[in-house]
Amino acid sequence: MPTTIRQRRTILAAVCIALMAVIASVSGLNVAQPELSTAFGASQTQVLWIINVYTITLAALLLPLGALGDRWGRKPMLLAGLATFGVASAAAGLATSPEILLGARFLSGVGAAMIMPVTLAVITSTFPEDERAKAIGVWSGVAGGGGILGMFLSAALVDLASWRWLFVLPVVLVVVAGAMTLRSVPNSRQESAHGFDLVGALSSMVAVVGLVYFLQEGPASGWTTPTTLASALVGVAAAAGFVARELRTTAPLLDVRLFRQRGLARGSVSLLVVFGVLAGIFVVLFPFFEAVLGWSGLRSTLALMPMALLMMAASGLAPRLAAGIGRHATMATGIALAGAGLVLMATSVSVSGGYLSILPGMLAMGLGLGLTMTPATEAITSALPQEQQGVGSALNDVTREFGTALGVALLGALVTTGYRNAISPRLHTLPSPVADTARQGIANALTAAHEAGPQAQALTHAARAAFITGWQHAMWAGTAVMAALLVFVLVLGARREGSVVAVAGAGAIAEAGNESSASEDLVGELR
């Protein structure tokens, strides 16, 4: 373990820069949605897939690659992930078709899944216990607000050059992070007498892809269409198979009995929902700024800065608040504030009201999400032994990225469907080619307005009003999800956790032969 504060700060900077590259690529393409639609003639649904294929791949591979990082060595895994990620990002910037861009984004997701779990594992295995919460707070701030800062730089590149240049940012970050990792990040690994759980890894990947596809295609194609239903059945069956496999095998990829511990379960579900809502809101905000208000990408990203800065500040404040009022109370307060922000954004948004109509809701969301992220992350990592922090960090990350994929899929699809249903009745007087283009999304409608002749102004107004309708559908859906999360957290925290921890950990405690400290022993084991 590094012995000086300076060494630990250098390590923290290295892994946070690597994390910034991953997070910026999750959100960076949001600023270029209109440009992608125009460059490739893509519909809003296709643009959502270009954005989300990266997140789906990342979510699907986080858990198995986190486990491999534990076995192979965290530093080699981080360096290999940075190399893969950098090459894929460069390929995405040079893409000549949607198919090439999709392939590059997929490969970027593979590299990101090698990077992300290692960054948190390095922190939890390097920092002493009395410094760990603060370091996790910095990491959480980068994971939450850093994506918006990355979008700011991406937007500047899009406005000054083209959407292709936004891939320069992750390449630069990868080079810096790679150099710092080679020089300062220590290596650590976990010795295991058991083989790798390949069946569990495959079933977890199929479950993620099936469920995300179901949520993304359901609102657009119909919840009862054969393809949608098949993806749901495959996802649920794979998830059930994963749980059954992990309960039976002697060397599980993830011991699902771990979730009997209420603190860890609460932290995992909170991160899943919080990052899902946050990612879904980003997908909605950029078309609102750029297409409804007519702003540039750079100005749109500047409009997110108050929310981002408040989120990062709240992430740093959360450990001190949790020390005073408790981790559970801090999380519940943050969730309630974020839900209130969604209500404000659903009820006050309007074309005429502009930015000021949604700013109060954005600020409430930033404060609430920041207060929720750090204690939720610490609840997960503190439940695991130091030698298994790679898988534990992957569990933390997979809840974030799976939530992100679900949020983009569900809220993005709700906006698209709400927009299409609202604008379709207003297109009957337009020529069919113009009407068909306008149905694909607001960016397509504004482009088609140039060919609508005297009806151009009416089409523009109808498209913007239809987008507001889709916006409200997404915000109310997010509100419902946050309300359910608040109830879950309050109910789960209503009873004392001590007895639950003791019961859930009884099997592991008995095997260790240490029954005298049952309230403090680990619950289950990640291998």
Image (cartoon, rainbow, N blue to C red):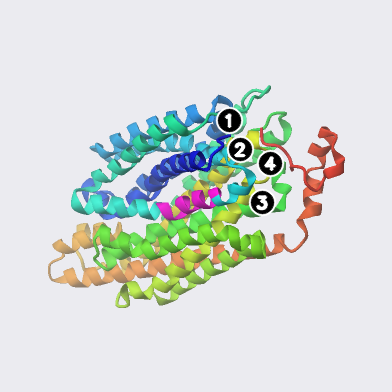
Residue located beneath label 2 in the image: 389
Can residue 159 be seen? yes
What amino acid is at disc 3?
Answer: Ala
User: Alpha-carbon distance for marks 2 and 1?
Assistant: 8 Å
Please report whichever mark, 3 or 2, sits nearer to the chain's N-terminal start: 3
Which region of the structure is painted magenta?
135-146
Tell me the amino acid under the disc marked 4.
Val
Task: Say what secondary structure mark 2 lies in.
Answer: helix
Q: Residue 408: where, in percent of width, then height? A: 44, 53
Quarter-wise, where is residue 361 in the image? bottom left
What separation in Å lies between label 3 and label 2 (alpha carbons)? 17 Å
Distance between the alpha carbons at the discs numbered 4 and 3: 10 Å
Q: Which residue is mark 3?
A: 265
Q: Nearer the viewer, residue 518 or 276?
A: 518
Q: Please state which of the two labelled residues, at mark 4 or mark 3, is closer to the viewer.
A: 3
**In which quadrant of the rendered image does the C terminus lie?**
top right
Contact between labelled residues 1 and 2, with CB atoms less than 8 Å apart: yes
Mark 1 and 3 residues: CB-CB less than 8 Å, in contact? no
- Secondary structure category for the residue under label 4: helix
State which mark lies toward you, 2 or 4. 2
